[in-house]
Amino acid sequence: MDSEFIYRRSTVIAIWSLLMAGAAYLFVFEPGRSGFFPICLFRFFTGLTCPGCGSTRALHQILHGEFLTAFTLNPLLLISMPFMLFAFLRYTVIVMRGGVPRPNALPGPYIYALFVVVVSFWIFRNTPFYPFVS
């Protein structure tokens, strides 16, 4: 086995281990009520929400099976999770089988479209219109 293969495989194992440890911590401790969770600096300094605001609380709700509550906390996270999970599972399978993953499988126009979606979500979640009314 070459060292690059061992490095990729150990990196995937380390990432999955950290994800599991983080999920266990997030399952036990509710953000905003117990445990240590960082604050959103964008919200702290501006009073506005960023695209990631509510993600930690939404992940806590997902781990407890409360998908509707998670959706109200951060809809973009809940919608994007299946795609992120698929991408990481695919990467994991390729690496564990000894393959070399492509550096970027997403064409440029899709990256720009994702950027537009995230920025649009960022803007619209700070408006007083449904469903972003807090």
Image (cartoon, rainbow, N blue to C red):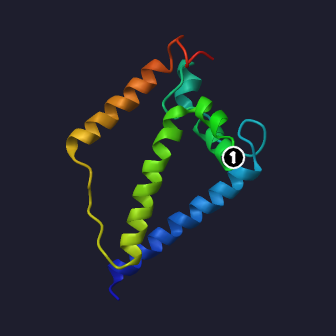
- Quarter of the view holding residue 105: bottom left
State how many labels appear.
1
Say what secondary structure mark 1 lies in: loop
* Callout 1 crowding tier (Cα within 10 Å): few <14, some 14–19, many ≥20: few
Could you tell me which quadrant the N terminus lies in?
Answer: bottom left
- Quarter of the view holding residue 37: top right
- Quarter of the view holding residue 47: top right
Where in the figure is residue 95, as x and y percent of width and height?
A: 38, 73
Q: Is residue 2 left or right of residue 33?
A: left
Q: Which residue is mark 1?
A: 65
Residue at image point 71% right, 45% down: 36
Where in the figure is residue 68, as x and y percent of width and height?
A: 64, 35
Q: Is residue 15 above or below residue 27?
A: below
Residue at image point 41% right, 70% down: 93
Residue closest to the far top: 128
Could you tell me which quadrant the C terminus lies in?
Answer: top right
Q: Is residue 24 left or right of residue 54?
A: right
Residue closest to the far bottom: 1
Residue at image point 47% right, 49% down: 82
Q: Is residue 128 visible?
A: yes
Residue closest to the far left: 108
Where in the figure is residue 9, as x and y percent of width and height?
A: 43, 75
Q: Is residue 38 visible?
A: no
In the image shown, does 2 or 75 lie closer to the viewer? 75
Q: Is residue 41 above or below residue 101?
A: above
Residue at image point 59% right, 15% down: 133
Dot 1 amino acid type: Gly
Q: Is residue 109 above or below residue 129?
A: below
